[in-house]
Image (spheres, helix red, strand yellow):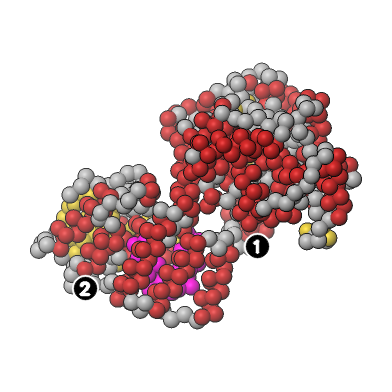
Amino acid sequence: MTSKINIHHEADVMVITVNNPPINAGSTEVRKGLLEAIELFQGDPKSSAAVIIGGGSTFIAGSDIKEFSQPLAEPHLPNVISAIENCPKPVVCALHGAALGGGFELALGCDARIALEGALVGLPEVTLGIIPGAGGTQRLPRLIGVEKSIEFICAGTRIKADEALKLGIINKLVKEDLLGNAIQFARSLIGQKNRIRDIATPKAEASSVLAATQKALKAGKNRPNVNKAIEMISNALTLPIDQGLAIEREVFQELRIATEAKALRHQFFAERKLFKALGSDEQNLKTIEQVAVIGSGTMGSGIAMACLSAGYKVLILDQNEVALANGAKKVVDFYESRVKSGKIAEDKASAILKGFTHSTQWADIASADLIIEAVFEEMEVKHVVFQKIEENASPNALLASNTSYLDIDAIAIKTKNPSRVFGLHFFSPAQVMKLIEIVRCKQTEPSVITTALQFAKRLGKTPVISANAFGFIGNRIYAAYRRQCEFMLEEGAYPEQIDKALEEYGFAMGPFAVSDMSGLDIAWAMRKSQAATRNPEHRYVNIADQLCLAGRFGRKTGSGFYQYLDGKKSNAVDSFVKKIIVEASDAKGITRREFTNTEIVNRVLLAMMNEIAHLASEKVVGDVTDCDVALVNGYGFPRWCGGPVFIAREMGKDKLESEIANLAKISGPGFMKANLDGLFE
């Protein structure tokens, strides 16, 4: 028996406990120990039934994902499940915490499932670029039907225990004493076997299966693993289970070693490490329960919603009474709309809004533990606001700026205690977007950054930590990406082709559609503020400036790079924009040429890789994989591609060096080739 599995007896019931903290991952050692335990149970004349339970806070919350990048060691999970099914004595799974992935498949291989209230079950493999590989696509449809299985498996849904009971996924739900109840339940099954494999899959209407399929493919971006998951689930209707299981395992193994699954594992591990600093510094965390947000615009009200939903008490302060009333209404309307749509219970929304206040009086921020400034993006305005904060806030309150590109050290220096000042860069809409940049200033105390991480975790955000540098991480990379797209406009491409190429690659939106949505005037204001310090010898594309001079600021004015009729983007090529672009090429003596979609995507990716290497060299980012996290969670980069750092590592350093050198030649004066070593460390 391995050290990961413990066995004890409760009279005639053998209790098999998985002990592989923190999540009891189904590693090789766990699988080996379970198989040995089942073999021992089968040959033990004193044991008439068995219970498998997880030690600590959870059942098996998934397989050991680190093993997926290597050849899987024996015994494989299907062998363990087969041993349970072929054992003539009943085996009951007792579930608490989470039974996910292989853990849930193990439970489906048992004769019955009993769960503690609050437990979750699910098959999230599709979110990692694979499919369930130990019978999930064959056994779950036999319990709940093909349509529901497509819905749950393709979305990686975590199903709450009470819903699982209604669906028949679990047999019994208890409020306490899970093990005692499981032992009693196991005794009631002595002499029986209740294998899911022996159940016929419920018949399904072709139209309902088609509807579930179309919905899953749309939500899953038509990715190969989603298609395969649907195919495997559908096999449960037509194929004998052993044939379905064999095909499922073969497809699982093929997808597991594919680049897409490798990219998603890269992203998974990059995100998982973000909160590691919390464990080592928890004793120094500051307490945050009350948050004050300065500014009631779109960003301020969005930040307030994010904080309220996380259980914080929130005050919005704005000295403009009309703006404050509008911002407060947005907050209230948000929760009322969620109640109407059934996304939140009315009593919960009421409880949240009880913690919400708004004011025009600076003195009201005195009780706040964290104050987040979210006012207009001008340094003079920020200085005035921080002066007021300094006069009225508690000396122990943490002070954050939501700026997207201003120098936070220049803000902090105006305060008496700059060690409590840092950046919290939310992305719009703040109540929805997962990414948040935590900006470390020169004098910020380490405990403040750790507290900010805890704050982000409670908000349900995905945080990356940046040094205080222009554009921080995300906007700095995006600027390089956008600049490369503008170069291609001058050289022969048009906005429609560039946007289409990048959207087909997997980006949520192309850069020019994004510009129109956010407003061309915002980036224009930033460029004008930098004009005096810009090197005149560096290549600069003025196409967007020309559009702004023509009053074309994007969606809000009805035209930008595209025309908008009744708020909808026109598919027609805009002759005015085309004329501006061609004139820009002619003015520089550039002979326009054709671009392929592959070339467009490659140039964008290379520009991103080069900029990330600069961020690493300049110590703006501590771990370059944080850049992949930022781009996926805040900038619409396709998760299944992993991110520029993942792609660079797949290319290899020699090839990347050559391609970046070529990009530098094409890009012209001002393109600085980075030291690429940081991408491979």
> In the image, is residue 140 part of the stretch drawn in magenta?
yes
- How many residues crowd around disc 1 within 10 Å: few (fewer than 14), some, or many (20 or more)? few
Which badge, 2 or 1, comes first in the chain's sequence? 2
Question: Magenta-highlighted stretch: main secondary structure?
Answer: helix
Q: Which residue is mark 1?
A: 340
Give the camera-side residue of 163 and 110: 110
Q: Are marks 2 and 1 in contact (CB under 8 Å)?
A: no
Q: Image quarter for residue 40?
A: bottom left
Q: Position of residue 554 (x, y in %)?
A: 81, 49
Pinpoint residue 212: horizontal percent, then vertical percent.
53, 71
Q: In the depicted view, which residue is nearer to us: 139 or 314?
A: 139
The reply, left or right, for residue 135 in relation to residue 680 is left
Residue 148 visible in the current orientation: yes
Residue 417 on the magenta segment: no
How far is the residue under mark 2 from the one under mark 1?
47 Å
Crowding around mark 2 (Cα neighbors within 10 Å: few <14, some 14 to 19, many 20+) is some
Q: Amino acid at mark 1?
A: Lys
Q: From the viewer's side, name the closer residue of 274 and 415.
A: 274
* Label 1: element kind: helix
| In the depicted structure, whether residue 173 falls above or below residue 459 | below
Residue carrying label 2: 192
Residue 296, given in percent of the width and then of the height, sits at: 74, 41
- The residues colored magenta run 132-156
User: Where in the figure is residue 71, as x and y percent of width and height?
Assistant: 32, 51
Occupied quadrant, residue 611: top right
Say which residue appears at 25% left-offset and 48% top-offset: 29
Question: How many dots with numbers?
Answer: 2
Residue 398 visible, this orientation: no
